[in-house]
Image: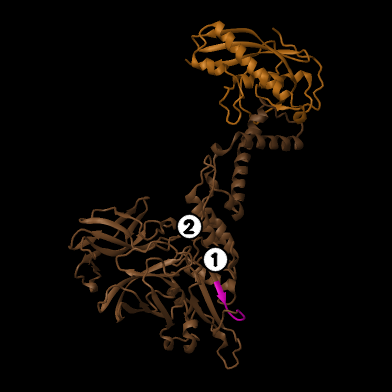
Chain colours: A brown, B orange
């Protein structure tokens, strides 16, 4: 703030400049005044005024800088609260980041009850801290009505394990750790052997930079109603600011767009408008939701289970299906889903509860028209499972966009939705990219491989919605 | 030593300052000047009186104590207050150092003609000479009698009033 600037902040150069200006101005008006060093006029008239003038000039410069988002964006020492103050003039708030969440598999040495308090700490080797969000009681015979967690015995019987949810201690993308990342217990847990990320952690978002705010400012200051693409963007961002749903980008498909099929439900197949599909990207890297599903044996070595609409709302794809204690860690197999290490499976989508919704969805074309929405369910057939027991528990990982159900609920509110409109929120179609880089460099100038990876990662994830994929 | 003020000088068009040493202009042979603050009865000075006033102000100002003007002043009062002047010889030496500092600053400003215009010769310092000096340890005072000579050739003597606490 300007009042923080004192004379101690004024430099000699600033004072000299102010003094020269005052001498010039005073002498222009009163040329008979002698203002040289040592004169009384200089000491009484010029010097105190120059101090104040320099101080005010400094304050004005700082104020001027703080009034411009462009200037602030180039100032690495800028105070984020100054940015927020300007954005408040437009009724806009900067996203302050989001905490990553994910499950941890904790290995323990014996079959006994384990109790973890709320905010029990787990720490990675890099020092990232994660906390439990509630107290957990882990038992071999859990009382699920009381929220107890199941303690499992490993296949070879050498250890026991359980899976609980964690949340990052602070906001930031660096907390989106990969599956298999080692986690040590930060508090005492008797019998603790080891911990690891059971699935990729997701939802960690850095504080929004000034450049990012500038990019979305046109939408943020626009008219807020579910009408134009810009105003839909603005209204949704405004509502979900400071919530766990961090909207990164939105693509609205409506009247005249080739991907809009729901407005052609008439004998002529003519588009009539008023149907909008809102694709929401609420992640920088795709969220991974991990489910434990019990499959029923439907054929030798083949199990089947259903993923209901509310279990992973609008999920895009199944990343892997594996044994419950497995870690399918390779990120990508260059274009192949499922990931290496997964059982082969068949994923058949369909609509769910269409009779209870007012949304215009053709039941005969439900697979397409409910795709990646909260009205989608899936029947999954898992093949080549070694066991043939009547039921089998699987670990299922799915790529999703977080908060889709919340967004659909908001769009359906009577006070929000356009009375002439029909809006369905959908998970965007994700292009999963694997990059294999071989860098040749002079040994005197080593390459920062981690930074290179991060730059590639950030570049790819910043592409967002594109009409056509290119090789570059 | 008597002051040497010409009887007739045309001061019209001169740059003026406010009178700080209120007794300089009195046409007496020897005058102990007093430094006073500006009052409602402030007068203006110019010519050699202004030169003497600037000199006195600078030599009494402790160097490196003025915010944003560390070169302003001299070492004289600092040395007096630090108690390093134990005899007349040291006092003479202190004056020589301080006088050199003041003369350098005056000439630096006097040379800025593009800002202040050409300076009349009776306002430009030619030299400052220590005529007499003494230390009164009983009263914690020093006595400096200085003759300021301008480039016009006129000169004026004054006594610097200082008290050096020990």
Q: In the rendered image, is residue A193 in sight?
A: yes
Relative depth, front residue between A429 and A375 = A429
Left or right: residue B41 compared with residue A356: right
Mark positioned earlier in the residue sequence (1 or 2): 2
Relative depth, front residue between B79 and A283 = A283
Instruction: Tell me residue A104's x, y (percent).
Output: 32, 61
Q: Which residue is mark 1?
A: A464
Q: Which residue is mark 2?
A: A207
Tell me which corner region of the image, top left, top right, bottom left or bottom right, holds residue A48.
Answer: top right
Tell me which corner region of the image, top left, top right, bottom left or bottom right, holds residue A118.
Answer: bottom left
Left or right: residue A373 compared with residue B73: left
Instruction: Tell me residue A16's x, y (percent).
Output: 65, 34
Instruction: Tell me residue B69's x, y (percent).
Output: 61, 28
Q: Secondary structure at mark 2?
A: loop
Instruction: Tell me residue A261's x, y (percent).
Output: 55, 83
Give the Cα distance between marks 1 and 2: 18 Å
Relative depth, front residue between A12 and B2 = A12
Is residue A165 depicted above or below B32 in this figure? Answer: below
Mark 1 or 2, closer to the camera = 1
Q: Residue furthest bottom?
A: A267
Q: Find out whether the residues at labels 1 and 2 contact each other: C-beta distance under 8 Å.
A: no
Q: Secondary structure at mark 1?
A: loop
Q: Quadrant of the N terminus of chain B?
A: top right
| Magenta range | A251-257
Is residue A77 depicted above or below A219 in this figure? Answer: above
Please tell me how crowded label 1 is: few (under 14), some (14-19), or many (20+) other residues with Cα within 10 Å: some
Q: In the rendered image, is residue A224 in sight?
A: no
Left or right: residue A159 compared with residue A402: left
Residue A173 among magenta residues: no
């Amino acid at each position: 703030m300007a009042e923080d600037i004192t004379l101690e902040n004024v430099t000699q150069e600033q004072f000299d400049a102010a003094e020269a200006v005052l001498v010039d101005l005073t002498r222009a008006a009163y040329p008979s005044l002698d203002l040289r060093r040592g004169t009384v006029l200089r000491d009484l008239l010029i010097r105190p005024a120059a101090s104040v003038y320099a101080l005010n000039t400094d304050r004005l410069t700082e104020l001027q800088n703080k009034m411009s988002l462009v200037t602030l964006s180039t100032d690495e020492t800028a105070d984020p609260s100054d940015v927020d103050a300007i954005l408040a003039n437009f009724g806009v708030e900067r996203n302050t980041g989001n905490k990553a969440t994910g499950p941890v598999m904790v290995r323990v040495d014996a079959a006994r009850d384990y109790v973890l308090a709320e905010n029990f700490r787990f720490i990675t080797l890099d020092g990232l801290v994660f906390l439990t969000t509630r107290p957990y009681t882990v038992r071999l015979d859990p009382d699920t009505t009381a929220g107890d967690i199941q303690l499992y015995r490993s296949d070879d019987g050498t250890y026991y394990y359980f899976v609980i949810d964690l949340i990052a201690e602070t906001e930031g993308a660096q907390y989106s750790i990969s599956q298999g990342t080692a986690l040590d217990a930060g508090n005492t847990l008797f019998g603790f052997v080891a911990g690891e990320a059971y699935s990729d952690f997701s939802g960690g978002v850095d504080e929004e930079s000034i450049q990012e705010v500038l990019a979305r400012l046109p939408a943020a200051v626009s008219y807020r109603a579910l009408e134009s693409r810009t105003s839909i963007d603005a209204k949704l961002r405004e509502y979900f600011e400071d919530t766990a749903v961090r909207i990164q980008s939105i693509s609205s498909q409506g009247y005249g767009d080739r991907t809009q099929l729901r407005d052609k439900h008439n004998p002529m197949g003519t588009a009539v408008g008023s149907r909008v599909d809102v694709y929401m990207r609420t992640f920088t890297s795709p969220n991974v939701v991990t489910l434990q599903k019990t499959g029923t044996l439907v054929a030798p070595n083949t199990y089947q289970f259903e993923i209901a609409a509310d279990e992973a709302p609008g999920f895009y794809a199944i990343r892997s299906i594996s044994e419950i204690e497995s870690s399918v860690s390779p990120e990508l197999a260059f274009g192949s889903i499922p990931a290496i290490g997964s059982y082969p499976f068949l994923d058949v989508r369909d609509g769910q509860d269409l009779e209870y919704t007012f949304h215009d969805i053709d039941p005969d074309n439900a697979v397409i028209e409910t795709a990646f929405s909260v009205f989608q369910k899936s029947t999954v057939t898992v093949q080549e499972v070694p066991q043939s027991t009547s039921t089998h528990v699987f670990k299922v990982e799915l790529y999703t966009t977080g908060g889709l159900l919340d967004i659909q609920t908001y769009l359906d509110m009577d006070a929000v939705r356009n009375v002439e409109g029909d809006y369905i929120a959908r998970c965007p179609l994700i292009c999963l990219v694997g990059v294999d880089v071989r860098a040749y460099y002079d040994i005197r100038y080593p390459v920062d491989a981690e930074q290179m990876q991060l730059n590639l990662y950030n570049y790819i994830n910043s592409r967002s919605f594109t009409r056509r994929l290119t090789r570059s | 030593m008597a002051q040497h003020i010409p009887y007739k000088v045309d001061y019209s068009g001169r740059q003026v300052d406010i009178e700080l040493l209120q007794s300089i202009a009195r046409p007496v042979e020897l005058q102990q000047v007093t430094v006073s603050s500006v009052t409602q009865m402030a007068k203006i000075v110019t010519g050699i009186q202004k030169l003497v006033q600037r000199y006195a102000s600078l030599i009494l100002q402790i160097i490196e104590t003025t915010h944003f003007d560390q070169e302003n002043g001299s070492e004289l009062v600092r040395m007096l207050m630090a108690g390093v002047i134990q005899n007349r010889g040291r006092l003479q030496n202190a004056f020589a150092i301080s006088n050199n500092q003041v003369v350098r600053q005056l000439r630096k400003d006097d040379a800025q003609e593009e800002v202040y215009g050409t300076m009349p010769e009776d306002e430009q310092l030619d030299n400052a000479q220590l005529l007499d000096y003494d230390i009164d340890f009983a009263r914690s005072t020093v006595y400096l009698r200085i003759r300021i000579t301008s480039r016009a050739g006129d000169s004026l003597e004054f006594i610097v009033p200082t008290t050096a606490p020990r």
